[in-house]
Image (tube, rainbow, N blue to C red):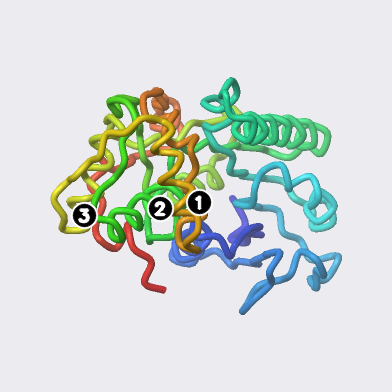
Amino acid sequence: MIEKRVGLIGAASFVGERLRLLLEKEGYRITAFSRRGGSNMVSLLTPAVEPLEQIENWICLAPIWTLPENFHLLEKHGAKRLVALSSTSRFSKKNSPSLSDRELASQLIRGEEQVLDWAHSAECLLVILQPTLIYGLGKDRNVTEIARFVQRFGFFPLFGQGRGLRQPVHVDDVAAACCSALQMSSGKKNCYILSGQEVLSYRTMVERIFVALGRKPLFLRCPLWLFDLAVRLANLLPSFKGLTTEMAVRMDKDQNFDNTEAKADLGFRPRPFHPLHSDCTDRS
């Protein structure tokens, strides 16, 4: 029987916010770790938990390439089971024309490989979860960025036809998958893709964000140079630092993935993409 105790790295993230609520509901005692520290959290920079305290179950929501920095923490507390969050960007951005995209994919791939090697040598049961575009709570860097642009300017720039396929996955569905993976009695496999239930085009995804905001969809078709100019101008405002020209290049690229194995082994049941206003705007 799994001990109802879990160490949570990256607890201050927006996925961590939802996962903590779910774990508490499931009866887990949580020791939360974060680089920033904070209320009821242990700083990863100055850990203050007793060295001999046993925490066999762990979930890491921090970028997976940073997890090797904390292997000593897991070892010190006798980790026997680890769930680590990665991303399907390790596949979709591997051969991107964008250097920053390729570097992100390399970090994810290298991080996964290091965690797999460590788990094998430490005899720790490992499950790596690879979600697609996570949204919710108005705190993500995907749907929320688009929503902010729409709210500020009333339209959205579209490069090409916007036909690239997407499968946005809600933060609560990712949190539920983390909890399910933690409770697996044995590892059937090491990696599971967490994609949203619905496959839709980039344009349709943005249209539904308009609807969630109570606005009529309005697109401005533009060449890449004009999109780049719009992004540069938007980046002058603090709220739009996350917008990049690479977003335009990816609008016609498919980024959909099969979640069959996660459904079978984790009971993963993601929702279709019909965001609420609260999913697109941060009110915290």
Between the C-alphas of marks 2 and 1, the distance is 7 Å
- Mark 1 or mark 2, which is nearer the start of the sequence? 2
Q: Earlier in the sequence, mark 3 or mark 2?
A: 2
Q: Quadrant of residue 68?
A: top right
Camera-side residue: 238 or 266?
Answer: 238
Instruction: Work out how far the residue at label 3 is from the one at label 2, CA to CA, in angstroms.
Output: 14 Å
Cα–Cα span, label 1 and label 3 = 21 Å
User: Farthest residue in the bottom direction?
Assistant: 39
In the rendered image, the vertical position of residue 92 relative to residue 81, given as above or below: above
Say which residue appears at 49% left-offset and 67% top-offset. Answer: 24
Farthest top residue in view:
95
Give the residue type at disc 2.
Glu
Q: Nearer the viewer, mark 3 or mark 2?
A: 2
In this orientation, which residue lies closer to the viewer: 184 or 68?
68
Disc 2 crowd rating (10 Å Cα; few below 14, some 14-19, many 20+) is some
Count all numbered tags in the image, as a single digit. 3
Q: Is residue 119 above or below residue 26?
A: above
Q: Quadrant of residue 7?
A: bottom right
Question: Residue 97: which numbered mark, if any?
Answer: none
Contact, mark 2 vs mark 1 (Cβ under 8 Å): yes
- For the point 85% across and 52% down, the residue is 72
Residue on which disc 3 sits: 212
**What amino acid type is highlighted by mark number 3?**
Ala
Three-letter amino acid code at disc 1?
Gly
Residue under pointer 1:
242
Describe residue 148's horizontal placement relative to residue 245 as left or right: left
Task: From the image, tell me which residue sits under label 2.
Answer: 145
Q: Residue at x 72, y 46 (%)?
A: 80
Of label 1 and label 3, which has the lower sequence position?
3
Mark 2 and mark 3 in contact (Cβ < 8 Å)?
Answer: no
